[in-house]
Amino acid sequence: MAADNIDDPDIVTEVREAFEAYNRAIEIGDTAALNGFFWQSPKTVRFGPAEHLFGYEEISGFRSGVWKPGAPRRIEKLIVTTIGRDAGATWALFRNIDGTGPVTRQSQTWCRFPEGWRIVAAHVSAPNVP
């Protein structure tokens, strides 16, 4: 793959905007929006701090049932990498907006589908490091 297919600024902006919209939905607890960001496939995966979700049905069921929004948070670091026009990944570190609590890690793999950018894989964890 040619180097000019990596991190096209327009595609990086698109993925970052999708990432930011997803995280705004987390902050306000918009379950329907959060579910809409995931690819509706049995191959979609989300690993959370205490859950291992395989497939859109498990992910949307978790969001619609058990999940509750947490404390407001801020991004401490974000990397967005894109490959070609239709794939990207985000890696972010978050902390509570007041600076308390552990750093939370969030990684997502995004793909462009006819309906827009969707998460095909995600991992959220809070390691035991300050």
Image: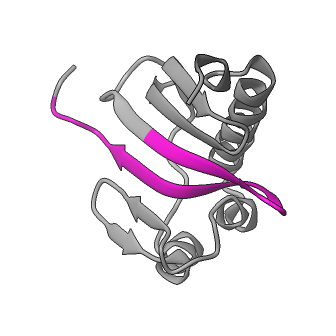
The colour scheme is one colour
60 in the magenta segment: no
Left or right: residue 124 versus residue 15 is: left
- Image vertical order of residue 70 relative to residue 37, above or below: above
Residue 90 in the image, given as x and y percentages of width and height? 53, 34
Query: For residue 113, which quarter of the picture?
Result: bottom right
Residue at far left of view: 128
**Viewed as shown, does residue 79 lie left or right of 103?**
right
Left or right position of 119 against 77? right
- Please name whichever residue, 70 or 5, is drawn nearer the observer in this view of the structure: 5
Residue 100, image x and y in percent? 37, 22
Task: Specify whether residue 32 is in view.
Answer: yes
Question: Residue at coordinates 28% horizontally, 39% vertically from top-left?
Answer: 126
Q: Is residue 75 above or below residue 33?
A: above
Furthest residue toward front: 2
- Asked if residue 110 lies in the magenta stretch, the reply is yes
**The quarter of the displayed image where residue 64 is located:** bottom right
Mark count = 0
Question: What residue lies at 30% left-to-right and 53% top-to-bottom?
Answer: 49
Asked if residue 36 is positioned above or below residue 14 in the image, the reply reads below
Mainly helix, strand or loop, the magenta region? strand
Residue 120 position in % (x across, y down): 54, 59
**Viewer-proximal residue, 88 or 28?**
88
Give the image location of residue 47, x and y in percent: 35, 59
Residue bounds of the magenta highlight: 107-128
Quarter of the image with the C terminus in it: top left
What residue do we see at 46% from left, 31% from top? 91
Please name the residue shown 64% across and 21% down the image: 7
Residue 97 at least partly seen:
no
Q: Quick one: quadrant of the N terminus?
A: top right
